[in-house]
Amino acid sequence: MANFFQLIKTKVPLIKSKGAILVAGCSLLLFYFIFNPEDSRFMPQCIFHKITGLQCMGCGAQRMIHALLHADFKSAFMANAFLFCSLPLLIFFIWVEISRSRHPRLYARCHSLPVIISAATLLIAWFIVRNLLNL
């Protein structure tokens, strides 16, 4: 019987935190569905862009999410092409993070130094290309 209570003590907070994350995520998606980042004054603006005039790697991400939620794939691609093309990979990495206890070797490979260096290199290359070509 003591094992049952230990199981409840360890699993219930985990289930509650996953539920809270799910509710927060759905609320955020609903928010981005309703409000267009281009028209709303209360949406966060990119400080890096305001200071330097350059677009950071994430500039356009809010517009992309809004466009995707409205199934406007062309506008989503135009808002942030790199992030749009990276969505399947990002979804895969989220799945790896969620299932890391079931797939520890895959988790370790996805968090290896070559993967991290590759991701950083791609992000830096995107930053340079998007600002040189005004994408």
Image (cartoon, helix red, strand yellow):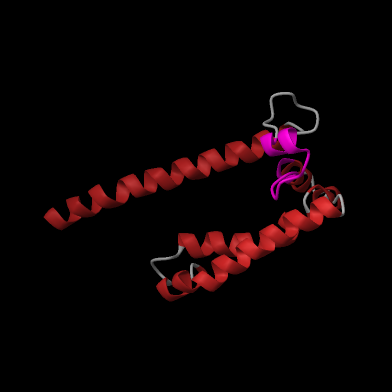
Q: Seen in the image, is 85 located left or right of residue 3?
A: right
State the residue lying farthest toward the left.
2
Q: Is residue 59 magenta?
A: yes
Front-most of residues 11 and 100: 100
Q: Is residue 90 left or right of residue 22?
A: right
Say if 133 sits above or below 116 in the image: above
| Image side of residue 117 versus residue 133, left or right | left
Q: Where is residue 44 shown, x and y percent of the image?
A: 67, 31
Q: Quadrant of residue 42?
A: top right
Confirm whether residue 1 shows in the render: no
Depth check, front residue: 70 or 94: 94
What residue lies at 35% left-to-right and 49% top-to-bottom?
A: 14
**Residue found at x 62% / y 60%:** 90
Residue 120 image offset from top left, x and y in percent: 61, 61
Residue range in magenta is 46-62
Observer able to see residue 61: yes
Q: Is residue 126 above or below residue 27?
A: below
Q: Position of residue 30 (x, y in %)?
A: 65, 37
Give x and y (percent) for residue 89. Answer: 64, 64
Q: Quadrant of residue 55?
A: top right
Residue at (69, 29) in percent of width and height: 43
Q: Quadrant of the N terminus?
A: bottom left
Vertical order, 126 against 104 (above or below):
above
